Amino acid sequence: MTGRLVRIDTHRNRIPLLAGTAAALWAAAIALTIAIANASGPPAIDTGIADPVHAWALDNPWAVSLARMFALMGSGAVLFPITVVVVLVLLRNHRWWALWVAACGIGGLVISQVVKRTIDRQRPVWPDPFEAPDSFSFPSGHTMAGIYGWVVFGIVALYLLRGPWNRIVGVALIAFGVLMGPSRVVFGVHWPTDVLGGWLYASAWVLTVTALLLWRRYRIAPGT
């Protein structure tokens, strides 16, 4: 009983930190969004990074092939069915985790689409593109999916998988999700600030969901 109370207090104590970090990330995401919306074109930091990265990718086809694999794994055609399977498996014995995964995924996708349509930023245009998608650029949807999808799966693996492989699998999934962002610049379909915006929005949302669900689960009952 004492151990359980200690765990509850530990989770409660994390909520203010999670909420505060989420608030800071939301503020940074909104500030970046305002800057992008008011810019007349890509800022120097975008072209200064994207131009040499694209030139490097042209000389390194293996990097383009790797970026193409990331593009597939971050697509809805792959990520949606995986998320559904993960949620269904978790519903059997870990309903809190199932709700967390579902909320992160659904909310992350909605945020991505709403901001994209609001900002209406055009993607990079190259004379020799690897791919030329016609959707909006900011924030990077694949970058966000890497966080609310693959990073979330990695966290689930770290906490719930048993045996010596849980850390290896968890860290590998988290690393894969984070690297989804840079792969979009290598592939030439996003500016670096699109990736930064994707990281900020997705991380802010995941932390917000985590704080809210922890508060809901461990909130102090009236009179205690």
Image (tube, rainbow, N blue to C red):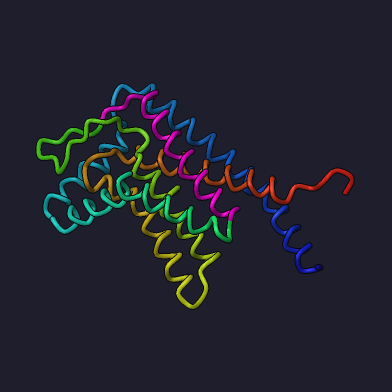
Image coords of residue 18 (percent x, y): 62, 48
Q: State the extent of the magenta-drawn residues as a range.
A: 95-122
Which residue is situated farthest in the front direction here?
92
Residue in front for this viewpoint, 102 or 181? 102
**Relative to 93, is 55 above or below?**
above
Which residue is situated farthest in the bottom direction here?
164
Taking the spot 76% from the left edge, 65% from the top edge, the residue there is 4
Residue in front for this viewpoint, 81 or 219? 81
Residue in front for this viewpoint, 216 or 44? 216
Which quadrant of the structure image shows residue 45? top left
Taking 137 as reference, is 134 left or right?
left
Image coords of residue 61 (percent x, y): 13, 55
Dividing the image into 4 quarters, which one contains the N terminus?
Answer: bottom right
Taking 219 as reference, is 175 left or right?
left
Assign the magenta stretch its main secondary structure: helix
Image coords of residue 157 (percent x, y): 49, 64
Which quadrant of the structure image shows residue 222? top right
Taking the spot 12% from the left edge, 49% from the top edge, the residue there is 58
Residue 100 colored in magenta in the image: yes
Taking the spot 30% from the left edge, 34% from the top edge, the residue there is 44
